[in-house]
Amino acid sequence: MQSWAQGQSQVLLVQGGHERVGQVEPRQRDQHRPLNFSTSIKVLVLLSQICSSGREPIMSGKASTLAFSMVYRISEIVTPSRSDPGNKCLQGEHLLLGSGHMTIRLRWSKTDQIVKGKYSRLDYIDDDTLCLVCNMQAYVSTGVQRGSPLFCHREGSYLSRF
């Protein structure tokens, strides 16, 4: 009985030690900040100077245009990782371009947990730099594969949120 009690007291000491370590060193606050639109524009200018392919800055620009125009969440547009596309991102076949508009089908959304899907129609606007329809037509003209995520790098890896 005495050895059992000693064992239990050692367990409690170890557990208490873990609790005290957490209290001695307070947690660091997360220093990450969300990317804003002006910083995104600066990054896109640098991408056009760095990338050997003209497709990369176009792809990144169009993905950020969709996200920063507040039409979709970034998690709805791109894959959760560069190697695994999953099934929650925007696919090539989910984008339908018409004359003066485009229709996008989201299979998954944070606000659509029942997974009924959501269709969005976006119309043309006069400003070509901010018009989502013009931007997506320019991106699709660089080549989009059906059956894969809409935003893929030239070598085949997926554009992710990380």
Image (tube, rainbow, N blue to C red):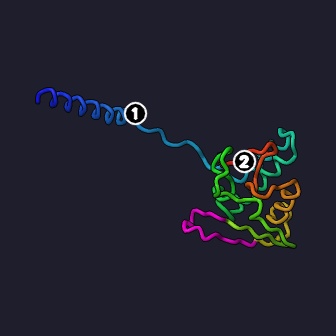
Tell me which residue sits at (63%, 50%) in the image.
Answer: 80
**Hey, which quadrant is residue 52 in on the image?**
top right
Residue extending furthest toward the left: 1
When the figure is inspected, residue 5 is found, relative to residue 48, above or below; the finding is above
Tell me which residue sits at (65%, 57%) in the image.
Answer: 87
Mark 2 — residue?
158
**Hey, which quadrant is residue 134 in on the image?**
bottom right
* Residue 162, magenta (yes or no): no
Tell me the number on the disc at residue 110.
none
What is the x, y in percent for residue 75?
Answer: 63, 56
- Image quarter where the C terminus lies is top right
User: Which class describes the residues within 10 Å of circle 2: few (<14), some (14-19), or many (20+)?
Assistant: many
Determine the CA span between mark 2 and mark 1: 38 Å
Magenta-highlighted residues = 107-121
What is the x, y in percent for residue 17?
Answer: 30, 31
Circles 2, 1 touching at the beta carbon (< 8 Å)? no
Query: What amino acid is labelled 1 in the image?
Result: Glu
Mark 1 — residue?
25
When the figure is inspected, residue 151 is found, relative to residue 26, above or below; the finding is below
**Helix, strand or loop for disc 2:** loop
Residue extending furthest toward the front: 147
- Image quarter where the N terminus lies is top left
